[in-house]
Amino acid sequence: MPELPEVEVTRRGIAPHVAGTRVARIDVRNGSLRWPVPAGLDALLRGETLIDVTRRGKYLLLEYAPGWLLVHLGMTGTLRVLPEPNALPAAGVHDHIDLVFERCALRYRDPRRFGAVLFHPRTSGDVLLHPLLANLGVEPFSDEFDGNWLYAGTRGRSVAIKQALLAGSIVVGVGNIYASESLFRAGIHPRLAAGKLSRPRCEKLAVAVRETLAAAIEKGGSTLRDFVGSDGKSGYFQLEYFVYDRAGQLCRVCGTPIRQIVQQQRSTFFCPHCQK
């Protein structure tokens, strides 16, 4: 957490407020995140106009003329809009960075500090060549991602299909929650070897991945523990989970108790009747 839907909800929340506006200053109170925040960020970007806010996988990309800020929310990070840049509320102990613009500010909060704020200079080439982005799989909402793509990417693979989704090399951004939910929608057991999926089942799973992520984005993401959107409001897709975090509860489709297993130290939830 946060996963792709939460990051996309954040992107949609902040972009209308800051795209096309200039940076007044950047206040870095604690640069010790997963990787150190680049020194001299304020001097580098002060006065620069934010060209666009895009997303690649679970990374937010804030584009400026000198380059891109890469923002990863880690496990507990949030990026919230503060509407009064000249009268910001006092920062808490976990409020590490303020990006102050002309009309508002973005405050990066991260209690566990597993997130990241990095800079990719334009002189180093396109941001998609950054080492953290270069080897990511296709976007789940792209035209490229379909049943044929999923079928080709799983051939010869003995790893469980859920682990193949989480790896991010076939399709990006399908984290633990949405992998469990997508597999339920597709009627596929999470332990099934990826290479054993037929082409029709791959098509069904590709559709399920897109539908699950789209539904989560529409509901503002899932709020488990710390996540809130850019406006400080909680998402509520968790109220519509079919299987995730519902161990022992009855399946919403068939009434069979939901089961929980552990795959590579991650909890997996599934219906033993609906998922073969």
Image (tube, grey):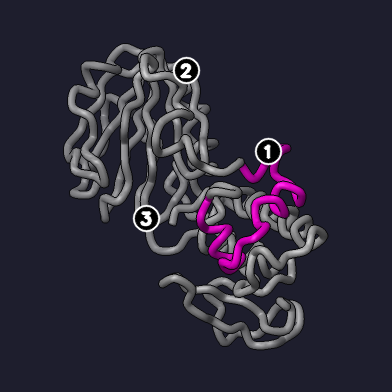
Placement of the C terminus among the 4 image quadrants: bottom right
Which is nearer the N-term, disc 1 or disc 2? 2
- Mark 3: which secondary structure? loop
Give the total number of marks visible in the rendering. Answer: 3
Residue 145 drawn in magenta: yes
Residue 142's disc number: 1
Viewer-nearest residue: 175 or 247: 175
Residue 75's disc number: 3
Which residues fall within the magenta stretch?
139-168
Real-space Cα separation, disc 2 to disc 3, in angstroms: 27 Å
Crowding near pointer 1: few (<14 within 10 Å), some, many (20+)? few
Real-space Cα separation, disc 1 to disc 2, in angstroms: 23 Å
Query: What's under tag 1, amino acid-wise?
Result: Ser
Which is nearer the N-term, disc 2 or disc 3? 2
Residue at x-position 47% and y-position 77%: 262
Residue at x-position 70% and y-position 51%: 152
Residue 29 drawn in magenta: no
Real-space Cα separation, disc 1 to disc 3, in angstroms: 25 Å
Q: Which residue is mark 2?
A: 51
Query: What's under tag 3, amino acid-wise?
Result: Met
Residue 187 makes an appearance in the image:
yes
Percent across and percent down for residue 271 are 66, 80
Query: What's under tag 2, amino acid-wise?
Result: Ile
**75 lies left or right of 134:** left
Please report contact status of discs 2 and 3: CB closer than 8 Å, yes or no.
Answer: no
